[in-house]
Amino acid sequence: MIILPSRHDHFPAADIDRRARMRAAAAALVADWAAEDQAPDGVLAAMRAVERAPLDEAIAALAPWVADVGWLGARLNQALDLLAADCFTRPPLRPVGGASFGGLLLAEAGPVRLTLLLRPFEAAGVKDEPAPLFVPGRTLTHILAPGGAMARFHHVVVSAAEEAGAFTAVTASPCTTGALRPLVAGEMLALDTARTCFSFVGGDADMLMLELAVQPPSRLPNRAYEAASGRLAHVSASRRDSSFRGMALTLLRTLGRTDAAPLFAAESESEDFAARWSAMREMVALDPAIAQPHLVRMAAGDPHPEVRRAAAATLALYASHSSMDGPALARENSACPA
């Protein structure tokens, strides 16, 4: 077996002066970019000006930053200059990533984010299309390099009542899916992402796009659908703070932190119905005995009908599966539409 040395094997850990020069160069670039972004004509200033504006108005105001990418090219060239000066310098760019996309978060202000996204060629070989996911908000996407990929658009109907908080899984509209169409370099895709999303299929090269997203807190949850049947498959909290707390509760449950039970109980009273039920399921998995009185309260008086039914169904499992531990109880009721 041949073991090739890692780039990090050559990092100049003992060269204090060189490391200081690298940090100074990166810090100087951070300061320059911050000054540019926060100037009256900068991207961050433009974002902050529309943080609380109506969604379509915010997208229209920021569209020039998506359409003309000259500023972005200049910024990336500056990052490459850092690397050219010293390959171990870390450019001040914030990476983001997911199952099939990676990229760079370029700017963020409240619910407004501007991201450069890369879909690598390797993702084009994945046979299964991702599940259509609808997230309340608006996006404007500039296709910089289509990479030979095809786009498929998915649509759902959302009523004003559902947007106001009356969404239920049992009455949710099915997802309809359109035909594949080729992507075109330079095209701009403006979407109401509560109702429309797209997925990508195939390709023969890397795909690159610049995405502006405005996704303020919403009482409408995120919804994932089965692509083939159009059936609602999963509902989750759309608020980013609820999502972060949900991930923290999952970690605490995995660690068996029963001393953190008050945190689970507090989140089970969240304004977001999907967050409430997610917290309750995690609490049941953590310790059924601790969760039981909170389940009784939820089954009797939760504002959302599906959460009440799910809590009542879980309470019934206590009697019929008295030997089950917390994780088994949670798995047994995992099909709950809430």
Image (tube, grey):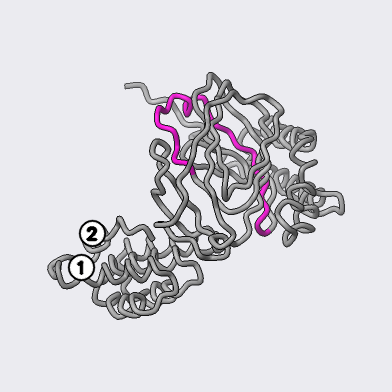
Disc 1 residue type (three-letter): Leu
Was residue 119 drawn as part of the magenta stretch in this picture?
Answer: yes
User: Residue 216, position in %: x, y?
Assistant: 63, 59
Q: Are marks 2 and 1 in contact (CB under 8 Å)?
A: yes
Q: Nearer the viewer, residue 327 or 60?
A: 60
Question: Viewed as shown, does residue 79 lie left or right of 262?
Answer: right
Question: Looking at the image, is mark 2 or mark 1 earlier in the sequence?
Answer: 1
The label shown at residue 317 is 1
The stretch in magenta equals 110-132
- Along the line of sight, which residue is nearer the eye, 321 or 248? 321
In the displayed structure, would residue 263 be above or below residue 49?
below
Amino acid tagged 2: Glu
- The label number, if any, that marks residue 332 in the structure image: 2
Q: Quadrant of the C terminus?
A: bottom left
The residue positioned farthest toward the top in the image shown: 204
- The residue sitting at 74% across, 37% down in the picture is 72
Q: Is residue 227 above or below residue 246?
A: above
Does the stretch in magenta take in 279? no
Question: Where residue 186 sits: x, y (%)?
Answer: 71, 28
In the image, residue 108 above or below residue 153: below
